[in-house]
Amino acid sequence: MREHLQEVADFNVPVTSAEDTELIAAQRRRAVRAVASASRSAEDCALLLEALGLKPSEGIAGVPAQRLG
């Protein structure tokens, strides 16, 4: 039983890898864009983003790199 509790406790480790951080940023970017597309007005969007703890700047996507080939 004690081993199982330790496994569960180890599951909740903080995000440390760059890949995980990038995935979270992408998820937040998509969330901001989804809220913006479903909002009735700029004020509505601002209120929803604030309620969700998101910032409008998180919805800005960078310019993708040029594909070679």
Image: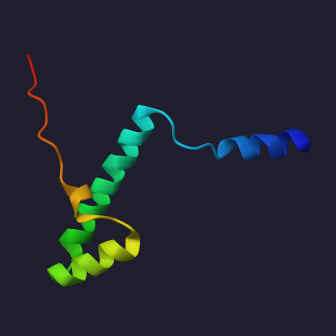
Q: Is the residue 28 above or below the residue 49 in the image?
A: above
Q: How many marks?
A: 0
Quarter in which the N terminus is drawn: top right
Q: Is the residue 29 above or below the residue 63 in the image?
A: below
Residue furthest right in the image: 1
Residue 58 placement: quadrant: bottom left
Q: Is 6 positioned to the left or the right of 68 in the image?
A: right
Asked whether 13 or 1 is in front, the reply is 13
Q: Is 31 positioned to the left or the right of 66 in the image?
A: right
Q: Which x, y percent locates residue 64?
A: 13, 36
Q: Which x, y percent locates residue 67?
A: 10, 25
Which residue is at 28% across, 54% downward?
29
Residue 56 placement: quadrant: bottom left
Which residue is at 31% across, 72% downward?
49
Q: How was the colour assigned to the protein in this rendering? A: rainbow
Which residue is at 15% across, 82% downward?
41
Which residue is at 12% across, 30% downward?
65
Q: Which x, y percent locates residue 30?
A: 28, 56
Q: Which x, y percent locates residue 39?
A: 21, 78
Q: Is the residue 45 above or below the residue 62 in the image?
A: below
Q: Is 17 positioned to the left or the right of 8 in the image?
A: left
Quarter in which the C terminus is drawn: top left
Q: Is the residue 43 above or below the residue 17 in the image?
A: below
Residue 33 placement: quadrant: bottom left
Residue furthest top in the image: 69
